Image (cartoon, rainbow, N blue to C red):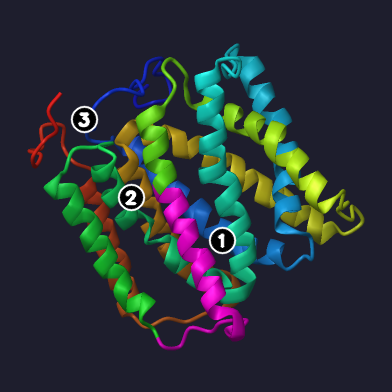
Amino acid sequence: MTGAATSETSRSPESKSQPYGRPGLMAIGGLILLGLVWGLFFSLSRFAGETGVEPVVLVAYMILAESPFFWLICWKRGRYPRIWRPASMLFYLMAATMGYFAPAVLELISAPIIGAGLLTVFVSMTPLITVVLAFAMRTEPPSLRKTCGVVVGTLALLPIMLREDLVIPLPELAMQGFTYAIMVAICYAFYHNLVAKFWPEGEDNWQLATGETVAGGVIFVPFALLVYGFEPIPLSDSNLILLFSGYMLLSMTSIYLYFYLLKAGGPIFVSLSGFISLGAGVGFGILFFGERHPHWVGYCLLVMLGAIWLTSSPKKEKILNPYQT
């Protein structure tokens, strides 16, 4: 097996930036799947945000529902997150806040305001922000090829972002919704680099996924209950239960895929799932809602595939001004 799934070692928190190798076909396939999952996830965020349940409470319920499944997987594998180590718990708390709790709440708030499509467009800017932070935090050394890949992908988004026929559900709150949406992209970009730089040594994908969930159960769930109180979900509503189950399944799938891809290709590579999620949003709109788009949207999606190829850099790629160790 290749990639991160079987790796027992990782980059230490104090390690300097270093180039990642070329991701294999399985990693590229996983990147496409993650983008598809996120594209559908944003659509479900709008539906979930319109249920009337407070977003913070909904995320707390999600954590409680996911925890037993992650623990069951850890029990089956015989490997558990090292939550007793102060450094690991601090990492879990920071990663869970920036990569799960904060963006999830912001998505649930912004999606009903600006719509799932516009939310997807804003979040698809994550790769550009990730590159800036990767070079600033020295998570990866400056790479001309990867920089070009992100720039190409961003340029491919511009025609879609500048469309004048985008419909906003609540135009009077548009600026507020835009602010929340861009904060989602910033959270994800910081999260990509945080996990890549401070991944606890000796822990693997499932351990980190479970550790994040544990951190959320210890900190986030009590906070939600204290501030908002207990708000039961009506179990008699089959549509709501189906929505909740789908939301949870996509969340768990994306968490594992994310950690796998991060170790396989690095923070810039995994952030490209934002580009794919935009294409997925267009596709799901056509499939589920009968939306129609001009032919040039297809060309934009092809250019995004070129961006993925550029960012999947070879192992011996020349880097620009590499940091000295």
For the residue carrying disc 1, how many other residues have a C-alpha within 10 Å: few (<14), some (14-19), or many (20+)? many
- 156 sits left or right of 29 in the view: left
Q: Quadrant of residue 305?
A: bottom left
Q: Residues under labels 3 and 2: Cα distance?
A: 16 Å
Between disc 2 and disc 1, whose residue precedes?
A: 1
* Label 1: which secondary element: helix
Q: Disc 2 to disc 1, how far (Cα)?
A: 20 Å
The boundaries of the magenta stretch are: 164-189
Check if residue 208 falls in the magenta segment.
no
Element marked by disc 2: helix
Rendered view: 41 above or below 116: above
Q: Position of residue 232 (x, y in %)?
A: 88, 51
Residue 284 marker: none
Q: CA distance from mark 1 to mark 3?
A: 33 Å
Residue type at mark 2? Thr
Drawn side of residue 117 relative to residue 262, left or right: right
Question: Can residue 283 be seen by looking at this rendering?
Answer: no
User: Counting residues from the N terminus, which is met first, the one under dot 1 or under dot 3?
Assistant: 3
- Main SS of the magenta segment? helix
Q: Which residue is mark 3?
A: 18
Density class for disc 3 (Cα within 10 Å; few <14, some 14-19, many ≥20) is some
* Left or right placement of residue 9 versus residue 167 in this view: left
Q: Secondary structure at mark 3?
A: loop
Residue 130 numbered tag: 2
For the residues labelled 3 and 2, say whether their Cβ atoms are less than 8 Å apart: no
Image-quadrant location for residue 128: bottom left
Disc 3 residue type?
A: Gln
Name the residue that disc number 1 marks. 42
Q: Residue at x 23, y 44 (%)?
A: 135
